Structure formats: C-alpha cells, structure tokens
Image (cartoon, rainbow, N blue to C red):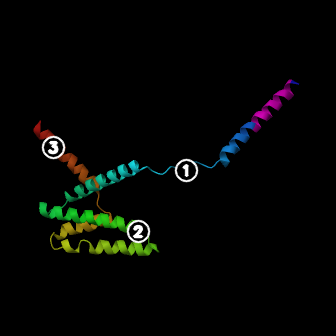
Amino acid sequence: MKKTILILFAIILGLNIHAQRRRHMNDIPQTNREPSEKEIETRERKMNERKQEFIDNFITTLEADEFQKHIVKQHINSFFDERMIILKTRFDHSLDRKNAIENLENTHFKDIEELISEGDMSKIKEMIKGDFDEKEVVKKKKKKRRNKRNKNE
C-alpha cells in the first residue's frame, strides 16, 4: 500500500514537471521593446562622440599643418555622413550599394589631393578601407603622457 501511494505520488509529480516544461517551450518569447526617444538620442550622441574621437586620433597621424588638418577633418566628417546616408538608403540590389560606396570612396577626396602630401593621402585611403589601427595611436598618446609626467616629477 505504501509503495503504491509512493509510486502514484512520483508519477503525478513527474507528469506535473513535464507539463510545466512543455508549457514554457511552447510559450511565445517576449520581443524586445522599441527604444525610446531618449535612448535613441543617447546612442546617437555616443556614436558622434566616438566618431569624433576616431577622427581626432587619425588626424594626429597626419604630417600636415593645422590648416590642412582642419580641412581634412571636415572632409572626413562629410565622408562619414554621406556614407551613412548611402547605407541607410534602400537599394534594389546590394551591388548598387557597393558601387555607390566605391564611387564615394574614389571621388570624395579628389579635391584635397593637391592640398596634402601623397603620404597623408595614402593614410586617408587606408583609413577609408578600414586599415587604420587606432589602438597604436592611443598607445603612443598614453606613452607620451607618461613621459611628460616622468619629466615633470
């Protein structure tokens, strides 16, 4: 009698656990909510700050004077803005988008080629293609700061 009650209790408990597990598997997961206006604004602000930091780090690697660096910085900002416009635009085919980006990369910096040196222009082309390593620049800046601190002490 005790064994049958114990077995019956175990079976009921097992079926209950199995039913609860199945219920959660069939449950439709909650989708993420849409971001609020405030979250969108903070994300855009952080992206702009990060973009400016990236551009500033790149500008420090150029060997131009301040006037030329300022012009290059304006062109890089406009390049990134135009690139985002192209990426947000709907195209019928991905090849159209790729061609538009290639055209932008090839033509956007044509007017400043005469203004800056060939070395700086090659650095800009590398940055456009994504070959610019920002970590090296940040390491050099930190090293310079350490050296200045050590000299002051």
Q: Main secondary structure of the magenta part?
A: helix
Quarter of the image with the C terminus is top left
Q: Residue at x 12, y 60 (%)?
A: 66
Q: Which residue is mark 1?
A: 31
How crowded pointer 1 is (Cα within 10 Å; few <14, some 14-19, many 20+) is rated as few
Query: Is residue 122 shown to the viewer in this render?
Result: yes
User: Judging from the image, what secondary structure is the residue with disc 2 in?
Assistant: loop
Q: Is residue 23 above or below residue 109?
A: above
Left or right placement of residue 54 versus residue 2 in this view:
left
User: Judging from the image, what secondary structure is the residue with disc 3 in?
Assistant: helix
Q: Which residue is mark 2?
A: 89
Query: Alpha carbon of mark 2 to alpha carbon of mark 1: how far?
Result: 26 Å
x and y percentages locating residue 93 in the rendered image: 46, 74
Q: Residue type at mark 3?
A: Asn
Asked if the stretch drawn in magenta spans residue 52, the answer is no
Q: Which residues are magenta?
A: 2-15
Q: Is residue 21 above or below residue 10?
A: below
Asked if the stretch drawn in magenta spans residue 10, the answer is yes
Please name which of the two marks, 1 or 3, marks the residue nearer to the observer.
1
x and y percentages locating residue 102 in the rendered image: 34, 73
Task: State yes or no: discs 1 and 3 in contact (Cβ < 8 Å).
Answer: no
- Ranked by sequence position, the earlier of labels 3 and 2 is 2
Q: Residue type at mark 2?
A: Thr
x and y percentages locating residue 57 in the rendered image: 23, 55
Q: Nearer the viewer, residue 93 or 9?
A: 93
How crowded pointer 2 is (Cα within 10 Å; few <14, some 14-19, many 20+) is rated as few
Quarter of the image with the N terminus is top right
Query: Is residue 65 shown to the viewer in this render?
Result: no
Q: Which residue is mark 3?
A: 147
Q: Residue type at mark 1?
A: Thr
Left or right placement of residue 113 versus residue 95 in this view:
left
